[in-house]
Image (spheres, rainbow, N blue to C red):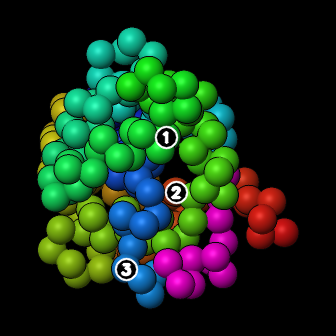
Amino acid sequence: MSKVGFLEFKYNLSKTMFLRKPTQMFSSRDREFSSLLPAYMPIMDEMKQVFDQIDSDKDGKISQEDYKDLLRAIRKENEIKLVPKIFKAVDLDGDGFINFKDFVKLHNRAGGVKTTDIHCAFRTIDSDENGKIGAKEVFELLKRLGEKCSLEDCQKMVTAVDADGDGVIDMDDFMTMMTGTMKPSQANC
């Protein structure tokens, strides 16, 4: 399909929502209702692939610089000042890094990926705020994340996700893509 395959596309989109604390992602109204919304537990292999993509120097741990680079790529520079606090809360062994064990515990402690996490990620990618993600927005996101692909490749990715054939990814398409391989959290059963 392209240099960035469909699954890699999904993992790159996942970067926009992983490692972010709910209190930093949502309005007070979102947090008020977040416990009522479904949550999904990512499959361990997917979590490892997301972790490995965030770990830019491939040393098996996410540094504060790795995390800051991710925030810059998804245009959340205003959250960079919170990185030391986030690491203090997530870094369980106190070595200054987030290893895969810390990463998994964070997601388990948070109860999985909430529907509001996925909505927030969608809004982050939907740069023109029209409620749809087009190939150009995917292209821009992947470029910011350091991926090399063409606009044509991005159109193919959008087409692969676009269930209703309108040429864009709407919230329903995005939700299906992001949760299709996840299992519902036990908290929701």
Amino acid type, mark 3:
Ser
Q: Residue placed at 54% from the left, 25% from the top?
A: 93
Residue most toward the right? 189
Coordinates of residue 23 in the picture (x, y in percent): 42, 67
Coordinates of residue 73 in the picture (x, y in percent): 19, 45
Contact? badges 3 and 2 (CB < 8 Å)? no
Please give the label number shown on residue 27. 3
Coordinates of residue 155 in the picture (x, y in percent): 26, 53
Please give the label number shown on residue 178. 2
Gap in angstroms between the C-alphas marked 3 and 2: 22 Å
- Residue 64 in the magenta stretch? The answer is no
Residue most toward the top? 59
Which of 3 and 84 lies nearest the eye of the viewer? 84
Gap in angstroms between the C-alphas marked 3 and 1: 22 Å
Quarter of the image with the N terminus in it: top left
Can you tell which quarter of the image residue 39 is in?
bottom right
